[in-house]
Image (tube, rainbow, N blue to C red):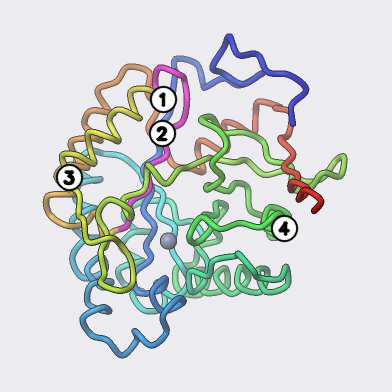
């Protein structure tokens, strides 16, 4: 824990954006396709209805979203599970060839909760090998499937040459993440996200698998995200938005997302950048690493 906080300022000690910049926005897409469903419900591999729902991104949504990004002239960061790259290689190459950053998102979208360190590392290495084989890419950024990390995850990422993680939820600003509490431990850059800036919860519904059946209007979702964008700009923070092509690639959702991007582009001093570009900036600041320690459970 920090020794003390300075609550008079929103900016963490030593943090600053590049000259002329007062906040940042990163538009990210997790190219999950079938992988999260197959990891949690392997029996669904035989269910055409469910598989077609997950294939919407690859067959329809990604092209639409690439058109949106192209019209707006921005670069996104796309976190791709290895399995998605194997199943939809040409689609994933299109993302790469359109100039977007490719990040790591597991092999079969494996949540880390309950995994041993060895198993976590094995899955990470498998995903890396597949992204290299199919896309010829060695990602520097990682987003944990299901946003699930263990206290071992940062050290495994650093061991395999990752520069940044995007998925912890304890800050509004990027920070330097210590990979262990050992003095001098390797560090990563952390680009925090949040469930509230993820399209899965408001939009996604698969009977018996995910969602409540209440599907939000894109107007409501974009209103909520716009409130957070404006508030984070005022605080000098990072607006880290997470969309899924099979979710937000739907027609009216993509229209609403384009509206949000337009709004972001109209904000003076807002830097719209990839995770890699933001992490590269943060790495120059010489920030004190943040150490996460697991809490002690109270004695009985
Ligand atoms: Zn995902």
Q: Is residue 208 above or below residue 282?
A: below
Evaluate if marks 4 and 2 touch, with contact meaning CB atoms under 8 Å apart: no
Which residue, as the protein is rendered here, is positioned at the far front? 300
Identify the disc placed on residue 59. none
Which quarter of the figure is the N terminus placed in? top right
59 with respect to 125 (left or right):
left
| Residue 202 within the magenta-colored segment of the rendering | no
Judge: label 1 CB < 8 Å from ligand 1.
Answer: no
For the residues marked 4 and 2, what is the alpha-carbon distance in whole angstroms? 26 Å
Towards the viewer: 184 or 76: 184
Q: Is residue 24 above or below residue 89?
A: above
For the residues marked 3 and 1, what is the alpha-carbon distance in whole angstroms? 21 Å
What is the secondary structure assignment of the residue under circle 3?
Answer: helix
The residue wearing badge 4 is 152
For the residues marked 4 and 1, what is the alpha-carbon distance in whole angstroms? 30 Å
Evaluate if marks 2 and 1 touch, with contact meaning CB atoms under 8 Å apart: yes
The residue wearing badge 3 is 218
For the residues marked 3 and 2, what is the alpha-carbon distance in whole angstroms? 18 Å
What is the secondary structure assignment of the residue under circle 2?
Answer: strand
91 with respect to 173 (left or right):
left
Q: Position of residue 107 (x, y in %)?
A: 51, 72
The residues colored magenta run 232-244
Q: Earlier in the sequence, mark 4 or mark 1?
A: 4
The residue wearing badge 2 is 239
Ligand 1 is found in the corner quadrant, namely: bottom left
Give me the residue at 63% from left, 47% from top: 163
Evaluate if marks 4 and 1 touch, with contact meaning CB atoms under 8 Å apart: no
Give the image quarter of residue 98: bottom left
Give me the residue at 72% from left, 42% from top: 292
Identify the disc placed on residue 232. 1
Query: How many residues crowd mark 3 within 10 Å: few (<14), some (14–19), many (20+)?
Result: some
């Amino acid at each position: 824990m920090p020794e003390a906080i300075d609550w008079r300022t929103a900016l963490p000690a030593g943090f600053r954006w590049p000259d002329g910049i007062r906040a940042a926005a990163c538009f990210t897409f997790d190219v999950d396709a079938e992988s999260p469903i197959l990891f949690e419900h392997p029996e669904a591999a035989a269910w055409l209805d469910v598989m077609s729902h997950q294939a919407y991104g690859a067959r329809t949504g990604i092209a639409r979203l690439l058109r949106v990004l192209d019209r707006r002239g921005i670069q996104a960061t796309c976190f791709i599970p290895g399995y998605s790259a194997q199943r939809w290689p040409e689609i994933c190459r299109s993302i790469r060839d359109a100039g977007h950053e490719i990040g790591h998102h597991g092999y079969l979208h494996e949540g880390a909760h309950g995994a041993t360190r060895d198993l976590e590392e094995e899955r990470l290495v498998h995903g890396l090998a597949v992204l290299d084989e199919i896309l010829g890419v060695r990602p520097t950024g990682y987003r944990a499937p299901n946003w699930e990390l263990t206290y071992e995850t940062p050290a495994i990422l650093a061991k395999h040459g990752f520069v940044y993680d995007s998925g912890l939820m304890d800050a509004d600003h990027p920070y330097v993440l210590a990979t262990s509490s050992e003095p001098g431990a390797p560090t990563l850059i952390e680009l925090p996200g949040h469930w509230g800036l993820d399209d899965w919860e408001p939009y996604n519904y698969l009977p018996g698998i995910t969602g409540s059946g209440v599907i939000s209007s894109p107007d409501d979702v974009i209103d909520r995200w716009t409130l957070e964008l404006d508030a984070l700009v005022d605080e000098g923070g990072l607006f880290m938005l997470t969309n899924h092509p099979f979710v937000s690639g739907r027609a009216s959702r993509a229209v609403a997302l384009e509206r949000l991007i337009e709004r972001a582009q109209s904000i003076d001093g807002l830097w719209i950048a990839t995770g890699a570009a933001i992490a590269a900036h943060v790495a120059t600041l010489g920030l004190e690493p943040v150490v996460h320690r697991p809490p002690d459970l109270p004695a009985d």
